[in-house]
Image (cartoon, rainbow, N blue to C red):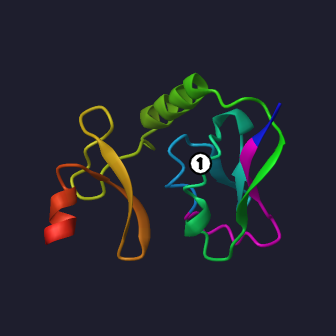
Amino acid sequence: MKRKIVRIDEELCTGCGLCVTPCAEGAIEIVNGKAKVLREELCDGAGVCLSICPVGALSIEEREAPPFDPEAAERNLAEKKLQGQGITCFRCGRGEDNGVLLFTRYRGQSTWVCTRCLPVLIHG
């Protein structure tokens, strides 16, 4: 099946890891110093990670890929949580189990914030 999916140009990739955090499905990881889409079925093709890359190594392309599997993405995130790598609010540490998290940029960093902490970021 053809669908839109993230492509990472390995020659441009510096391995900075900034694209890993915004990938809510956990499809992108750093392997041997380079970002990689480890399992294509985890990539929803939304492209939230694209604008984060400082060298423009990420793009969206339409190509043959397995269909997006939201259940596999959920299992992948659950495994990461068990390993202590789950998505949490950078201010209070709240996770997805007890709060709503939104992707944000704060002081030049890609991160997640819960809806309780978001007003503090907006209003100070």
Query: For residue 73, which quarter of the picture?
Result: top right
Specify the amino acid type for callout 1: Ala
Residue 93 in percent (x, y) is at: 26, 49
Look at the picture and state if 8 lies above or below 25. below
Left-right relation of 83 to 94: right
**Among all residues in the image, which is located at the extreme right?**
64
Confirm whether the magenta stretch covers residue 11.
yes
Q: Which residues are magenta?
A: 4-18
Residue visible at 76% across and 55% down? 7
Confirm whether the magenta stretch covers residue 23.
no
Tag count in the figure? Answer: 1
SS at badge 1: loop
Residue visible at 71% across and 43% down? 38
Q: Which residue position is annotated with label 1?
A: 46
Residue 58 in percent (x, y) is at: 70, 63
Q: Nearer the viewer, residue 44 or 15?
A: 44
User: Local crowd at mark 1 within 10 Å, few (<14), some, or many (≥20)?
Assistant: few
Left-right relation of 117 to 108: left
Left-right relation of 89 to 72: left
Name the image quarter holding the C terminus.
Answer: bottom left
Residue 72 in percent (x, y) is at: 60, 26
Name the magenta segment's main secondary structure.
loop
Query: For residue 1, which quarter of the picture?
Result: top right
Residue visible at 30% across and 31% down? 97
Look at the picture and state if 58 lies above or below 28. below
